[in-house]
Amino acid sequence: MNGEHIYWSERDGTVWRLPSAGGTPKMIAAGLHLVDWPWASDVGELEHEKNQTKVVNLETGETRQVAAAAGAEGLRCGPTWCVGQGLVQRVDGTRATRAYVSTPLSGYPVLDRYVGLVKEVLDLETGTKLTFPENPTSWSGVGISSAPSTIRYWGATKGDEPDEFRMVNLRAAQ
């Protein structure tokens, strides 16, 4: 959403725009999936093994080709950074580094900058890591969002229904 319009994409690769005031949705792109407005990918969320080949700015039309590092699998990119199975790199293929990426924060880099590791979040811009306090339970979650979620939370007390939680909001770290 940009204030004047609401944007979304469907699994079939169509991107839509609807005036905030209401009206009729208009298809604005085909064969793309929103990452975080205005950026879109040519690979859908269920195509896990496939590498993304481009990232497109739907406002300006700018297209950035993805130069996948050797052995990259499941590469997902924002405008600057990419995350794959065990790999992080820039869209242009530089700064490729092996990293064990965990599932809740994997997928597209959060805010085109953060990637989830097992018990920490790596800031790809600075190389610093945020390490989480000990998680006494075996579960964690992320906030629900159409863009990669900036929220991660977990139980701070034991049990299936903890009475205390911990939360990290990556947007606040910027």
Image: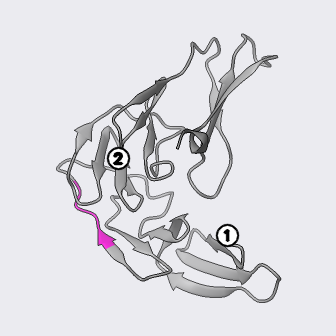
Q: Is residue 3 above or below residue 84?
A: below
Q: Is residue 156 above or below residue 112?
A: above
Residue at left offset 31%, top offset 66%: 53
Mark 1 residue type: Met
Residue lying at the far left of the rendered structure: 70
Dot 2 crowding, Cα within 10 Å, few <14, some 14–19, many 20+: many
Q: Earlier in the sequence, mark 1 or mark 2?
A: 1
Residue at left offset 44%, top offset 40%: 115
Disc nearest the viewer among 1 and 2: 1
Name the image quarter holding the N terminus: bottom right
Q: Is residue 93 visible?
A: yes
Q: Which mark is residue 69?
A: none
Q: Is residue 130 above or below residue 123?
A: above
Mark 2 residue type: Gly
Where is residue 137 shown, x and y percent of the image?
65, 15
Range of residues picked out in magenta? 64-68
**Which of the 4 image quarters holds residue 3?**
bottom right
**Which of the 4 image quarters holds residue 8?**
bottom right
Where is residue 136 shown, x and y percent of the image?
63, 11
- Horizontal side of 55 relative to 120 (left or right) equals left
Residue at left offset 73%, top offset 12%: 157
- Horizontal side of 166 relative to 58 (left or right) equals right
- Horizontal side of 66 relative to 70 (left or right) equals right
Mark 1 lies on residue: 1
- The answer to whether residue 139 is magenta is no
Where is residue 107 shown, x and y percent of the image?
46, 48
Asked whether 85 or 147 is in front, the reply is 147
Q: Which mark is residue 84?
A: 2
